[in-house]
Image (cartoon, grey):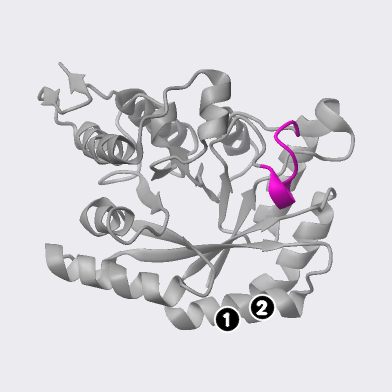
C-alpha cells in the first residue's frame, strides 16, 4: 500500500504570514518520508466539525497545487476532490493540464458531485439539486476526457456547450491525467467510476467492503475490468494516533483491496508530528 498526505487543515502555528513556508516544508518533508501523493480539498471554507469551524483558514485548491508542484519533485498532486459546481468543465481541464505540464507529469484530477450547500450559498456559487449536479459531473468527465484526447469537435450536452474544446499544450501524462472520482454513492457515483475513472476514493469505514462489491457490479454491467480501477481510501489521524494504530488501519484496508490511503490530520497544528507518524509507517506497509 502507498500512503498519501491529504492536507485538510491550514491552521498552522504562526498564522497566515508563516503559512507559505510551512506548507512548502510540509510537502518536502512528506515526499522525503516516502509519501507518494499529496492532495488538498477543493473548498473555500473549512468544513466544521473535527477539522475546525468554517472561519478557520482555507486556501484555494489549484493555487495551492501549483505552489506544491514547485516545492516537490515526485509526488502525484490533485484535489480530493474537486466540486463540479465550482469550475467550468473546459477551464477545469485546462487547470489540470497546466498542473500536469508544469509539474512534469504529476498533475491529476480528483472530482465529485459537490455537497457543501452552506459554502456555495455563502459565496454566491450556484448549487443545483443532486440530480443536476450528477448530470453536470458526467458531462464534465466527458469534456475533460475529450479535451485531453485532442478531439476539438463541438460538444453539446444538457448543461454545457463547447464550440471548440481546444487544449494546447496537451498534458504530459498520457493518455490523460490520472482521473479519480471521490464518493461512495452506490447508484450514481460508483457507476460513474466504473464508466470513466482510473480510481475511486471511498472513506475507510464499515461500509467500505460493500462499496467495493457494488463497484464490481457496476464494472460488470459496463464491461469494465474491475482490476483496472485503483481503489483508494481516506482516514484521519489525531494527536493520540500511534504508528501501530495507523499501520493496523492501513493493513485492514489493504486486505479489502485498497492500494493507497490518503491520511489527513485532525487537531494537529504541527506538521512535523504528522510527518514523523507517516515516516514511521511507510516502510511497514510498503
Q: Is residue 225 visible?
A: no
In front of the other: 42 or 134: 134
Residue 195 location in percent, x, y? Answer: 21, 55
Q: Position of residue 95 (x, y in %)?
A: 42, 28
Residue under the image location 72 percent in, 55 percent down? 265
Q: Quadrant of residue 162?
A: top left
Q: Is residue 92 left or right of residue 2?
A: left
Give the camera-side residue of 207 and 243.
Answer: 207
Q: Residue at x 26, y 52 (%)?
A: 192
How many numbered markers are drawn?
2
Q: Residue furthest left?
A: 153
Q: Nearer the viewer, residue 116 or 157?
A: 116
Residue picked out by circle 1: 251
Relative vertical location of residue 175 with respect to residue 16 in this rendering, above or below: below
Residue 263 picture quarter: bottom right
- Residue at left offset 18%, top offset 31%: 150
Q: Which residue is mark 2?
A: 247
- Which segment is the magenta one? 48-56
Callout 1: SS: helix
Magenta-span inclusion, residue 55: yes
Tell me if residue 244 comes above or below residue 21 in the rendering: below
- Disc 2 crowd rating (10 Å Cα; few below 14, some 14-19, many 20+) is some
Give the image quarter of residue 227: bottom left
Horizontal relation, residue 137 to residue 64: left or right = left
Q: Do labels 1 and 2 touch, CB within 8 Å? A: yes
**Within the magenta stretch, is there residue 169?**
no
Residue 96 visible in the picture:
yes
In the image, farthest residue toward the front: 129
Q: Position of residue 29 (x, y in %)?
A: 73, 52
Task: Indicate left or right for 3 with 108 as reference.
Answer: right
Amino acid at each position: 500500500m502507498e500512503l498519501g498526505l491529504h492536507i485538510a487543515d491550514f491552521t498552522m502555528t504562526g498564522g497566515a504570514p508563516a503559512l507559505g513556508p510551512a506548507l512548502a516544508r510540509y510537502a518536502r518533508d512528506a515526499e522525503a518520508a516516502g509519501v507518494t501523493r499529496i492532495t488538498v480539498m477543493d473548498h473555500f471554507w473549512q468544513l466544521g466539525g473535527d477539522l475546525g469551524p468554517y472561519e478557520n483558514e482555507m486556501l484555494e485548491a489549484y493555487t495551492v497545487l501549483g505552489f506544491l508542484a514547485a516545492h516537490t519533485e515526485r509526488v502525484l498532486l490533485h484535489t480530493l476532490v474537486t466540486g463540479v459546481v465550482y469550475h467550468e468543465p473546459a477551464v477545469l481541464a485546462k487547470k489540470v493540464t497546466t498542473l500536469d505540464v508544469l509539474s512534469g507529469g504529476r498533475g491529476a484530477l480528483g472530482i465529485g458531485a459537490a455537497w457543501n450547500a452552506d459554502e456555495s450559498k455563502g459565496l454566491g456559487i450556484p448549487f443545483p439539486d443532486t440530480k443536476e449536479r450528477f448530470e453536470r459531473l458526467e458531462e464534465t468527465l466527458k469534456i475533460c476526457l475529450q479535451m485531453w484526447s485532442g478531439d476539438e469537435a463541438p460538444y453539446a450536452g444538457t448543461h454545457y456547450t463547447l464550440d471548440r474544446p481546444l487544449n494546447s499544450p496537451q498534458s504530459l501524462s498520457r493518455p490523460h491525467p490520472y482521473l479519480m472520482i471521490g464518493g461512495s454513492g452506490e447508484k450514481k457515483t460508483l457507476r460513474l467510476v466504473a464508466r470513466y475513472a482510473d480510481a475511486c476514493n471511498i472513506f475507510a469505514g464499515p461500509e467500505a467492503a460493500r462499496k467495493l462489491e457494488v463497484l464490481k457490479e457496476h464494472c460488470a454491467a459496463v464491461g469494465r475490468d474491475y482490476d483496472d480501477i485503483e481503489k483508494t481510501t481516506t482516514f484521519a489521524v489525531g494527536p493520540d494516533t500511534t504508528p501501530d494504530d495507523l499501520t493496523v488501519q492501513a493493513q485492514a484496508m489493504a486486505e479489502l483491496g485498497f492500494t493507497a490511503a490518503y491520511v489527513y490530520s485532525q487537531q494537529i497544528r504541527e506538521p512535523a508530528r504528522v510527518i514523523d507518524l507517516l515516516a514511521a509507517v511507510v516502510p511497514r506497509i510498503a
